[in-house]
Amino acid sequence: MLEVAQIREHKDAFAKALSKRNIDASEMLDKVIAADELRRSSQAQLDEVLADSNKFSKEIGILFKNGEAQKANILKEKTAGLKEQSKTLQEQLNNATEELQALLYNIPNIPNESVPEGNSDEDNEEVFRKGDIPVLHGDAQPHWELAKKYDIIDFELGTKITGAGFPVYKGKGARLQRALIAYFLDKNTAAGYTEYQVPHLVNEASGYGTGQLPDKEGQMYHVTADDLYLIPTAEVPVTNMFRGDLIAHSELPITCTGYTPCFRREAGSYGAHVRGLNRLHQFDKVEIVRIEHPDKSAAALDGMVEHVKAILDELELPYRILRLCGGDLGFTAHLTYDFEVFSTAQDRWLEISSVSNFQTFQANRLKLRFKDTDGSNKLAHTLNGSALALPRVLAGILENCQTPEGIKIPKALVPYCGFEMID
């Protein structure tokens, strides 16, 4: 959430920056300033009325004590009028505060200067590429056919149990899933991230805290009886662990990692681009989250990118990194790098990770602050990234590592899964 003081001071610059997202934010920003003016005016009037009411109350006591009941009763009438006025002003203040909050909740984050112009993922900027695209044998198949051939993932059984987008992993497929989770967590903890196991459902405050609400309300599974939401990513519960906290400067940075299943009600469509593991309603992901000092968050983002690169290097998968354009940038993100693995059997790139810096956008919603060395309380910067999302990593391994004899497991994973081939 943008800060009102910053909007008031930099309205034109913010409107220009938000135009990278292909939106005209001038009217929204003007409404924020107007709502804030009303809120401030209402608060000032209310403070004045309450001060007069308190003053008169003290005078009434003194007048009664001195036997001046007539004067005291006149002031009591004035005090009663002030109480009614204060109720009206309090209601006006509450309405203005709610309107301001609602406006702020619906304005996205300011893009970084380096974010390229663009309307969709076709306009994202490739900034890095590594790995040779393997030449597959003549009978190579996409992962959904390999899953059936080697009996490691059953999409039809998942549909029977729940519906489309909920696969069942079997045998070596299930072991490979477990191996990937353990491997990713070990890589993250070795890099200094503390592991957490967190709830898979969150309350509404958590959804608003990290910006999934109200922006992505229709994309989240809602348990209406308890007003809880199934998490779309571990980012939500992990970051919300620090909601409302005042962190000592010496505690920064705070680095967290955790594995969770993720649930997303994404609209379905037909075609190879969403077949198999390409788009699911339930999938596994290992996340990394950082709480940083504002002066160090840019370097922290670069470090997270290098961390994910190192994992993909060990998995020996061809990949590239994209800097997302304004039209493809997430609502809460200031700057995002997407990692994509090349699927040789599908002849296309598959997104497997997003690494983002939110600067103070989430922290302002979370009221997450730190005490700086000068003694002042400041908003922290939050960052997060996938390290990594499993479905498309698994799809990349199955497709790129297939041979006529079977699927050869990357060396880094063999100690975790206990086998070298799926055959």
Image: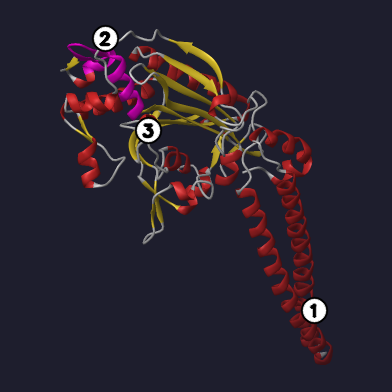
Q: Residue at point 28% right, 40% down? A: 166
Q: Which mark is residue 278?
A: none
Q: Which mark is residue 59?
A: 1
Q: Nearer the viewer, residue 375 or 383?
A: 383
Crowdedness near tag 1: few (<14), some (14–19) or many (≥20) residues, C-alpha within 10 Å = some
Secondary structure of residue under mark 2: loop
Q: Position of residue 410 (x, y in %)?
A: 27, 14
Q: Is residue 367 above or below residue 86?
A: above
Q: Residue at point 54% right, 23% down? A: 300
Q: Which residues are magenta?
A: 390-415
Quarter of the image holding residue 136? top left
First along the sequence among labels 2 and 1: 1
Quarter of the image holding residue 288? top left
Evaluate if marks 3 and 2 touch, with contact meaning CB atoms under 8 Å apart.
Answer: no
Mark 2 is on which residue type? His
Q: Nearer the viewer, residue 178 or 85?
A: 178
Name the residue tied to disc 3. Answer: 271
How far, Cα to Cα, is label 3 from label 2?
24 Å
Evaluate if marks 3 and 1 touch, with contact meaning CB atoms under 8 Å apart.
Answer: no
- In the figure, is residue 366 to the left or right of 398? right
Q: Position of residue 31 (x, y in %)?
A: 73, 52
**Residue 47 in view, yes or no:** yes
First along the sequence among labels 3 and 1: 1
Mark 3 is on which residue type? Gly
Name the residue tied to disc 2. Answer: 137
Crowdedness near tag 3: few (<14), some (14–19) or many (≥20) residues, C-alpha within 10 Å = few
Q: Magenta includes 408?
A: yes
How far, Cα to Cα, is label 2 from label 1?
95 Å
- In the figure, is residue 243 to the left or right of 179? right
Q: Is residue 317 above or below residue 91?
A: above
